Amino acid sequence: MATIISNAALADFSGTFIERGYLVLDGGRIGAIGGGAPPDVPGAEVIDAEGKLVTPGLVNAHGHLYSSLARGIPLKKFSPQSFREILEQLWWLLDRSLTLDDVYISALVGGIWHLRRGVTSIFDHHASPAAIEGSLSAIKRAVADELGMRCDLCYEVTDRGGMEERDLGIAENVRFAKEDLVPELASAHMGLHASFTLSDESLEKAAAAAEPLGLPFHIHLAEGKEDPVDALQKYGMRTAERLDKFGILKEGTLLIHGIQLSGAELELLSQRPASIVHNPRSNMNNAVGAAQVVKMLSRGIKVGIGTDGFGADILGELLSARLLAHHATGDPTVLGDGELLAIIGHNYELAGKFFGLPFGKLAEGYAADVVIWDYRPPTPLNEGNLLSHLLFAGISEGLLPETVIVAGKVLLRGGALVDVDEDEAMAKAREAAEALWNRL
Ligand SMILES: [Zn+2]
């Protein structure tokens, strides 16, 4: 059934701006956009967005939905002195205790948070070493089947739990990619944790399994100092150079963070088609430093943005990326609107590549993933300043979506979930979290 959004201000990050107009959504795509009154479409549902703003949905290029049950977690010991100790004292403790039911409810809760931030597509990086087989399908059931959002999933292959777990991780990536993808809604990568927890043999095995399926990789790169130190000590080369040896820096590969990189590695990345995904809030929280995003962009490296499981607020991440770049460089002009728009644009390119249709513009043929914001601009909103409005409405007024539509289907309407009982989901999550915390 077609849906028409009428009487709305319409704007995207590519310069489209209509002060008062309509959008026709049909067959999962935008069918028409225009000013004034909408055309008559028999049988269409009409959403009157009088005085409201309609934009494309947002994309999170790196998340960890499994982290949803960590809020308020009581840890007997948490005094990390390094990035590795943050993993050991929190994340590797938590992920090892997850059951398949926990994976499902974490994904449902995390998916709801994303929807409530206007995020309609998530690239997730998953770990649950005691419940590997079927874990990606549990996430897909919550996010794609039940919530109706788009997700690209992978399992973080690693040696840290031994060779049996490593092989189960590779097999789960392969199983999911072969059995459970949904056109335009659920896609896959070959997940790898990070260079410093993977031997040459493991990288070879994962690459060999990914090859026949045409899967690119999703891997943390040089987040903490552990990564380059390990690569240099064991293999005599830097982290990105090591990954390149295994053909990992290919088109569609997501290289997460890229903080501890040398000039030679940046040069190498500028000659490879893989993408960097920046996660500024997580980086500040883990005290791992600042990725050289400005340098990356100026060298033609593709950069997207994610949350790394630190919430679901992509607009907040964009503003944080700017603040971190100003702070790290001492230059208040870096990461201006043009650079942030390039980063947003790359997230949309990634969504387009993996979900198989164009994203990010309010234009005919583009994905019918749109957000309706109840936003009264205090200053003129025009062709070139949507980004500034959304970033600052986020921090000053706490702007949140009123309605979210994915693939033409209304998932959040008037601030309430349409198909999922949110109270029930949160109650189940609290129960699961309590049991999980007791198992730690
Ligand atoms: Zn991550």
Image (spheres, grey):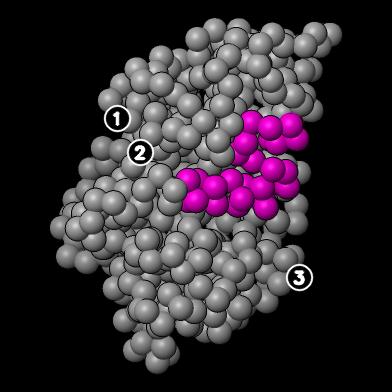
Classify mark 2: residues with Cα within 10 Å, few (<14), some (14-19) or many (20+). some
Residue 369: where, in percent of width, then height?
A: 63, 31
* Residue drawn at 23 percent across, 43 percent down: 74
**Badge 3 is on which residue?**
212
- Which marked residue is nearer to the observer: mark 3 or mark 1? 1
Can see residue 131? Answer: no
In terms of depth relative to the viewer, which is nearer, 207 or 366?
A: 366
Question: For the residue marked with disc 2, what is the amino acid?
Answer: Gly
Mark 1, ligand 1, within 8 Å: the answer is no
Classify mark 3: residues with Cα within 10 Å, few (<14), some (14-19) or many (20+). few
Q: Quadrant of the N terminus?
A: top right
Mark 2, ligand 1, within 8 Å: the answer is no
**Badge 1 is on which residue?**
395
In terms of depth relative to the viewer, which is nearer, 230 or 21?
A: 21
**Badge 2 is on which residue?**
316
Residues shaded magenta: 341-367
Q: CA distance from mark 2 to mark 3?
A: 38 Å
Residue 408: where, in percent of width, then height?
A: 69, 25
Q: Are marks 1 and 2 in contact (CB under 8 Å)?
A: yes
* Residue drawn at 72 percent across, 20 percent down: 24
Residue 85: where, in percent of width, then height?
A: 25, 64
Is 366 on the left or on the right of 371, as rendered?
Answer: right
